Image (cartoon, rainbow, N blue to C red):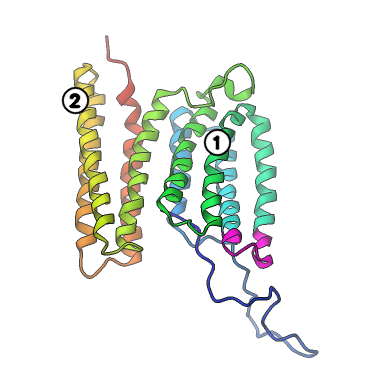
Amino acid sequence: MSRPASPTAPRPTSDRPTTPRSTAGTTRAPGSRRRRGPGWVPNEHGAWAMLVVPVVVGGVLTGVTWRTALLLVAWLVAYLAFHATALWLRASRRARYWPPVRAYGVAVVVLGIGLVASAPGLLRWAPAFVALLATSLACSARRADRSWLNDGVTVGAAMLMTLVAAGLGSGGSPGAGRLGGTWVPPGASDPAAWAATGVLAAYFFGTVPYVKTLLRARGERTVLAVSIGYHAALVVLAGGAVAIVAARGASRGSVVCAALLVVVAIGLLARAVLVPRRRPWPTAKAIGFGEIAATIVVTAVAFTAPALVALPAG
């Protein structure tokens, strides 16, 4: 799970540069570059998959359009603005953390205006995202951005983007192009989009305790138990999906999709049990490659998830 990095300490009490003042005749070494201030580039590389995958899945389900591309760009820039703002809040609003907040904030406003102008119905999503954003920024202000609450809030926001993207597709919600007429946000009435969202959410929420068992909560039995218990519950839910689909007399494709969920859930449970017990501890690189592989598999299954809600033939 990706959270903004903590400001490094200790720091000077003044916001002025701590390097010696330049004097006449002083030259910078050839090829040297002035280091950019904090907040410009997030160091949580695992966040990008969680940001991109829901938009891609939602867009593909209903047909990718230019608005899907604009949504993805705006969403990624919004993450950069969020990361910079959270870091600025954690740093007690120091001036040196403000430039990326200002730059990314302006970019988000411009992109957001263009996106809403093309699909005014997106404003119906505003209450949900404003509530999630406010909760996360409050956690950052309290220096609790690594808390379970904040992790859950940010994963939830990312997963909702599957529905948002589905609502903007060529076969998405007709109401996306207007603000009035309905209170339902674009994509929120699409069962297929909800099915894909559920698959992605089940996986990405599980990465919160799982990654903690390998990094910040390494060796903590309580967190390990939460991770194993969560993934065991996914196996049970996937098995329930098979039973429900079979009882409905659904098509073979629906049964196969449900069976795939069981296989993937068992694999994720095995990972949650075995990887934290490995010695020596897996490196950050190995953890990253493992997450990439798991994300690819889950994304592929998410594309088949609409079959779970398809009406039985005949």
Q: Amino acid at mark 1?
A: Thr
* Residue displayed at 53% across by 57% down: 142
Q: Position of residue 266 (x, y in %)?
A: 20, 43
Labels 2, 1: front one: 2
Q: Amino acid at mark 2?
A: Ala
The numbered mark at residue 147 is none
Which of the two labelled residues, at mark 2 and mark 1, occupies the earlier sequence position? 1
| Residue 31 visible in the current orientation | yes
Q: Position of residue 242 (x, y in %)?
A: 21, 28
Residue at far top of view: 314
Indicate whether 132 appears above or below 270: above
Mark 1, other Cα within 10 Å: few <14 / some 14–19 / many ≥20: many
Secondary structure found at label 1: helix
- Residue tagged by mark 2? 243
Q: Is residue 38 left or right of residue 156?
A: right
Q: Is residue 97 magenta?
A: yes
Q: Is residue 13 left or right of residue 289?
A: right
Which span is picked out in magenta? Answer: 87-100
Q: Position of residue 314 (x, y in %)?
A: 27, 9
- Residue tagged by mark 1? 68
Predominant secondary structure, magenta span = helix
* Residue displayed at 55% across by 51% down: 138
Q: Position of residue 256 (x, y in %)?
A: 22, 29
